Image (cartoon, rainbow, N blue to C red):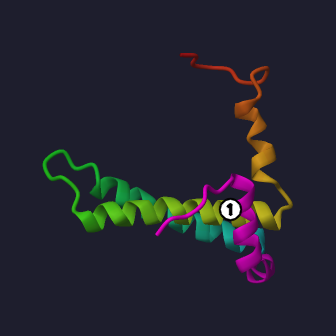
């Protein structure tokens, strides 16, 4: 399947279009609990994919990618119900006058 590149804003809007009504009804606190659950699932997938003595299976690798996607989706959900544009927030990392830390 070929897909077009997706901006952060496009992704956030896609999540909003599909899930906003139920997410907004659940509220920030309930939605944050879902995000923390996904962090736990991502932690397990990372552990499964980083064992020193056993490489990950194809299924474990696929699950890792799914868990990253789930964390991003729930983060976008929380941003949506709190009126935060994630792409705008990223100026913290894209504006050279604000970026500090490692420089190549």
Mark 1 Cα within 10 Å, few/some/many (few <14, many 20+)? some
In this picture, is 10 found above or below 16? above
The residue that appears at 18% across and 52% down in the rendered structure is 55
| Residue 98, x across and y down, in percent | 77, 24
Residue 12 position by quadrant: bottom right
**Extreme residue toward the left, this view:** 53
The main secondary structure of the magenta stretch is helix
Q: Answer whether residue 21 is visible to the viewer in this image.
A: yes
Q: Is residue 8 left or right of residue 80?
A: left
Residue 90, image x, y percentages: 73, 41
What element does badge 1 sit on? helix
Q: Nearer the viewer, residue 93 or 52?
A: 93
- Seen from the viewer's position, the closer of residues 5 and 8 is 5
- Residue sitting at 62 percent across and 20 percent down? 101
Q: What segment carries the magenta color? A: 1-26
Q: Is 15 inside the magenta-drawn segment?
A: yes
Residue 71 sits in which quadrant? Answer: bottom right
Q: Is residue 104 left or right of residue 27?
A: left
Compared to 96, does 66 lie above or below? below
Instruction: Inspect this view and state whether residue 29 appears.
Output: no
Q: Residue furthest top?
A: 104
Q: Is residue 19 magenta?
A: yes
Q: Give percent across and percent down for residue 49.
A: 29, 54
Residue at the (75%, 34%) spot, across then down: 92
Q: Residue at x 18, y 45 (%)?
A: 52
Question: Which residue does the numbered mark 1 point to in the structure image?
Answer: 11
Asked which quadrant contains residue 70, the reply is bottom right
Relative image position of residue 67 (x, y in whole percent): 46, 64
């Amino acid at each position: 399947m070929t897909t077009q590149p997706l901006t952060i804003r496009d992704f956030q809007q896609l999540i909003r279009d599909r899930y906003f009504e139920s997410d907004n009804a659940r509220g920030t606190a309930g939605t944050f609990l879902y995000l923390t659950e996904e962090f736990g699932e991502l932690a397990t997938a990372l552990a499964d994919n980083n064992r020193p003595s056993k490489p990950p299976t194809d299924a474990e690798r696929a699950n890792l990618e799914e868990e990253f996607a789930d964390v991003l989706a729930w983060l976008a959900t929380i941003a949506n119900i709190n009126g935060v544009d994630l792409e705008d927030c990223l100026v913290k990392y894209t504006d050279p006058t604000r970026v500090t830390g490692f420089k190549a």
